[in-house]
Structure formats: structure tokens, C-alpha cells
Amino acid sequence: MTERQFERRRSHRRRARVSIYVTLPGQKRQRCTTENLSAGGVFIRTDDRHVPQGVTAELVFVIRRGSVARLHRRWAVVTHASHRGAGLMLYNERDLAVLRSSGVSV
């Protein structure tokens, strides 16, 4: 079987290089670059920084259109990490509200 047959993604991922600021619990905000994006997740390059699996991260995507830059804030959980970077599963606003109401710190 091929690697693609084992994937558990719900949406197609696309190669994309986007500037992103990542804030992990107890760490300073870091500027990173995405490698690929999908509707449900993102893979970021982290330059061998330690990214703990299972933690919630705040993401700020910097989307540039000509001379205008828009910031898009999202939250995600680190699903896997390696020396190349980290894969994160994005939360939607409803998921975030449920987590907050259950007492989870996000």
C-alpha cells in the first residue's frame, strides 16, 4: 500500500507558502512558513524547534494581496512533529467555544 492510502485527512491538502506566527504554551511567538494547507490542517516548517505533540497553538496567518496584508487568527492542536516541522489540526470557532466552556485553557 502507498503512503497516500494510509492518510486520514478529510480534505485535500495543497502546497502553500504562507507566513504564519505560531504561539505555543509557555513559548514566545515564532515566525514560521507553511509547507501545505488544507481546510482542516496545516504543516509548518519549524527549523528543528521543539514542538510538543498534543498542545494547543495560536496561529496567525499573514495573507498578502498586493500591498495589503490581512491577519487570520486560528487555533490548532499539534498532531505530529518531526525535525522538518509540525502538523496541526485546526479548530473552528464552535470547537473553540466548546473547549472554553468545558474549562480547557485555549
Image: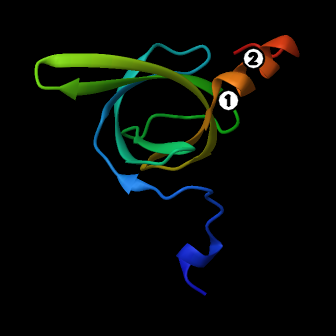
Q: Residues within 10 Å of mark 2 (few under 14, many from 20)?
A: few
Q: What residue is disc 1 on? A: 55
Q: Pick out the residue farthest to the bottom.
A: 1
Instruction: Tell me which amino acid carries mark 2.
Output: Ala
Residue 43 horizontal/vertical position (percent): 46, 46
Picture coordinates of residue 67, whole percent (x, y):
11, 18
Displayed quadrant of residue 71: top left
Quarter location, residue 96: top right
Image quarter of the N terminus: bottom right
Q: Does 63 appear above or below 37?
A: above
| x and y percentages locating residue 93 in the rendered image | 65, 22
Which residue corresponds to the image point at 67% horizontal and 29% vertical from the top-left? 55
Crowd band around label 1 with a 10 angstrom C-alpha radius: few (<14), some (14–19), many (20+): some
Label 2 belongs to which residue? 97
Q: Give residue 100's position: percent from left, percent from top.
A: 78, 13
* Snapshot quadrant of residue 75: top right
Indicate which disc, 2 or 1, sits on the residue closer to the N terminus: 1
Would residue 60 be found to the left or right of residue 101 on screen?
A: left
